[in-house]
Amino acid sequence: MHTQVAIIGAGPAGLTLAHMLHLQGISSVVIECRGREHIETRTRAGILEQPTVTLFEELGVADRLNREGLSHNGFYVRFDRSTHHLDFHRLIGGNATVYPQQEVVKDLVAHRLAAGGPILFDTAVTAIETTADEARLRLDHRGTTTELTADFVAGCDGFHGVSRAHLPAAGLREFTRTYPVAWLGILAHTTPTTPEGMYCAHESGISVHSMRGPRITRQYLQVPAGTDLADWPDDRIWDELTVRSASDDHPELERGEIVDRSLAPLRSYVCETMQHGRLFLLGDAAHIVPPTGAKGLNLAVSDACVLSHALGGWYRAGTRAHLDAYSQTCLPRVWKAQHFSWTLTTTLHAISDDPMDWPLRRARLARWVESEAEQAALGEVYLGLPFPTPWRHPAA
Ligand code: RFL
Ligand code: PHB
């Protein structure tokens, strides 16, 4: 089997890229090691930047997102028992949209299959070989091995995928920061405590209060890295969320049935370069941000936009320049998102024992609340910096 672009992974990066290539008449095969049901029900991200939503609209995949997504102007911060709304929309325009990652995946899978696919589910890429002329992938589908050749490989296989290992160590720079904390995330049948998401900074750690609908909340709690979920029965989770979100201006947090729980480590990672020969890395395969600030999925979509533009140039006009510049084009935006996530992570979490830590964090929070200049600077990145390359439909 041969295709123009082999795409490893049916997450937001791989599926967005496949759709953008399809619209340009470029063939691709998406290879996904998990089943369709698994990827369409996995609870993960929830906040889409304005450029991500605008891109999905331009690609014609946003009908349900526009109907069901919740449009937010900013977020709330709570500290010292007081609640403050940061209205980024008023200052810089644009919105953040709450629309769960698994719904993005469902929409993109449906469009991909309607366009004739293919998506090879339950199929793992087990080896990648690239030569000057082509790439060869070994695929394993329930014990049966096949081969796929392609002009290019898009490694969209997440942080634990196989494609990053194909970059030669010489010339590779990796940047890693591991935080000593994790997020314990829940989905619960309760009413959101504020109309838009809220970060609560407390001396014992952050709690995050987000939502998926009028009666379903997504909430997160800072816990030590290495925490065992078994140590967190429902009452302990609610007690801790209640302490961290206590305020003098809102009623106590509502408790309800918890229907999903998970743990996510907090780390930052960037791999420079993001490409080698015919292989290009996108999304979490190339970089990870801590979830504070909600940037990961949006970066995955932004990378897909850059690569689809570069591949379009190659197949339409034989231009290699945009492919050669792929990493350089993506990385400045990746680092700005890293900086934003680091700022939010270090301001909102209790990580250091240094007695100056909390007063300094509190001073930074006070500046966010009192200064429109600070809010505009935060809002520009939270609502989404422009993608490095715009999407231009080939027919336009
Ligand atoms: P994904 O989504 O991990 O998809 C990779 C896919 O590749 C498959 N795969 C393979 N397939 C074939 N062969 C192999 N050898 C393979 N190895 C792996 C996997 O099964 C998988 O389906 O990567 P992608 O596309 O780069 O997307 C990245 C996002 O998933 C991630 O950045 C976000 O979830 C991060 N994130 C958030 N991002 C946002 O933009 N907004 C948010 O609100 C937000 N909240 C979050 C988050 C991540 C969180 N956790 C779980 C870390 C909240 C949390 C708690
Ligand atoms: C979410 O709604 O899942 C969410 C909210 C805020 C974050 C990350 C994720 O920083």
Image (cartoon, helix red, strand yellow):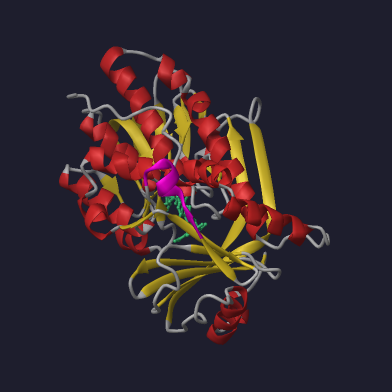
Determine which quarter of the picture holds residue 191: bottom left
In the depicted structure, whether residue 38 falls above or below residue 176: below
Instruction: Determine whether 50 is above or below 312 in the image.
Output: below
> Is residue 92 covered in magenta?
yes
User: Which residue is outermost to the right?
Assistant: 355
Q: Residue at x 45, y 48 (%)?
A: 88
Q: Is residue 375 magenta?
A: no
Relative to residue 79, is residue 238 depicted above or below?
below
Viewport quadrant of the N terminus? top left
- At x 47% / y 39%, what residue is drawn? 127
Relative depth, front residue between 197 and 281: 197
Q: Residue furthest bottom?
A: 235
Relative to 210, 24 lies left or right: left
Let me know if residue 126 appears in the view. no
Q: Is residue 311 above or below residue 288?
A: above
Q: If the image is split into quadrants, where does the C terminus sit? A: top left
Task: Tell me residue 18's x, y (percent).
Answer: 30, 38
Q: Position of residue 124 (x, y in %)?
A: 41, 49
Residue at 53%, 50% (x, y): give it. Answer: 160
Q: Between residues 339 and 151, which one lies in front from this camera angle?
A: 339
Can residue 191 be seen here? The reply is: yes
The boundaries of the magenta stretch are 85-94
- The residue lying at 63 percent from left, 59 percent from top is 348
Q: Nearer the viewer, residue 151 or 338?
A: 338
The x, y position of residue 171, in whole percent, is: 65, 25
Picture coordinates of residue 368, whole percent (x, y): 59, 52
Side (left or right) of 115 relative to 258: left
